[in-house]
Image: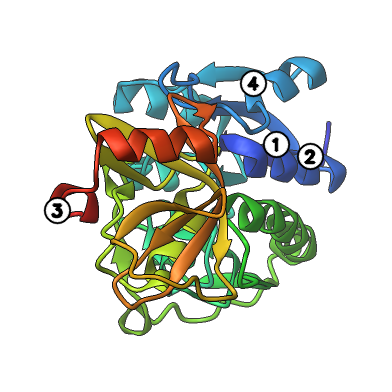
Amino acid sequence: MSSAKTAVVFAYHSVGVRCLQVLLARGIEVRLVVTHEDNPQETIWFESVAALCRERGIACVSQPQDTAQLLSMVGAIGPDFIFSFYYRNMLAPAVLALAKDGAYNLHGSLLPKYRGRVPVNWAVLHGETETGATLHEMSAKPDAGAIIAQTMVPILPDDTAFDVFGKLTVAAEQTLWAALPGLIAGTAPRQPNDLAAGSYFGGRKPEDGRIDWNASAQTVYNLHRAVAPPYPGAFTELGGARFVIGKARLANTPVSGNLPLGLTVVDNRIFGMCGDGNMLAISQLLLNNAPFAPQQLAEFLQLNPASPAASGK
């Protein structure tokens, strides 16, 4: 009879893949994995939990729509642990209670900051200089249970959310690897999760990437970094066309001349003029997912001069 600890795992995304691999490497017997079907409307740039389960011979099912069905499946296993690794749905308290040794979630922020949805994108949007991965107990409220372990990662000034997510995938692996021996032995420390010291954030929609050129260049740049491809991207609309910023930096040197807010072309380079008089130097502008060259934009702007709508108003 195996003495290994057993687990039911709810997982998705690259973090789900890496953390599943950590459980297996630490000797956890994963009896069932619950994951999500990929959304055809979403850019799938991350690793597949379902593919890993097929490779490793682990039972894997797509997210059940019915809580009673989920209770039956997990209850039949009676796992020691329940883990959630970037699974997108809350688990009912009745499901969490089925784990003999506790139910734990891996969250992509330094709790209690940035509880809730897409914490990496929100942290970059707000200009944070660091974030991290937190392993915590699951409770009825999202991201509110006691903290088991955390690992910090820096957010560099030009990091996009995609860059930060790569760091967090490694941080998640490190956090779980270090915490598992204590969880298995029942000796893992628990730190209070002071909800008053952080805030809860909801999900983001592609429309939230609309640029207000009246804002400061740093604000617009943070928006770009937070939603840059493979996310939907920061965008502006001109002449009925939606332009998405693919790559950009804050402009280091001022450009002479009285330039209008929004997209402009100077010396065959694309810039985005912002409300504080500073600019973004845009090295890749996209229209319909294809690069749009400076000369193309200059010709387009002659036919479609900037309007108040282009500045987000």
- The mark lying in front, picked from 1 and 3, is 3
The span from disc 2 to disc 4 (Cα, nearest Å) is 13 Å
Q: Position of residue 285 (x, y in %)?
A: 50, 40
For the residues labelled 1 and 3, say whether their Cβ atoms are less than 8 Å apart.
no
Q: Which residue is mark 3?
A: 308
Q: Is residue 26 above or below residue 6?
A: below
Q: Is residue 22 above or below residue 213?
A: above
Bin the neighbour count of mark 1 within 10 Å (Cα to Cα): few under 14, some 14-19, many 20 and up.
Answer: many
- The mark lying in front, picked from 3 and 4, is 3
Query: Quick one: quadrant of the N terminus?
Result: top right
Q: Is residue 207 above or below residue 54?
A: below
Q: Amino acid at mark 4?
A: Ala
Q: Secondary structure at mark 1?
A: helix
Q: Amino acid at mark 1?
A: Val
Q: Which residue is mark 1?
A: 17
Q: Amino acid at mark 3?
A: Pro
The span from disc 1 to disc 3 (Cα, nearest Å) is 46 Å
Q: Is residue 283 above or below residue 87?
A: below
Instruction: Decide if residue 187 is in sight here.
Output: yes
Instruction: Decide if residue 102 is in sight here.
Output: no
Q: Which residue is mark 2?
A: 21
- Work out whether mark 3 precedes mark 2 in sequence or the reverse, and give the earlier one: 2
Q: Which residue is mark 4?
A: 50
- Work out whether mark 2 precedes mark 4 in sequence or the reverse, and give the earlier one: 2
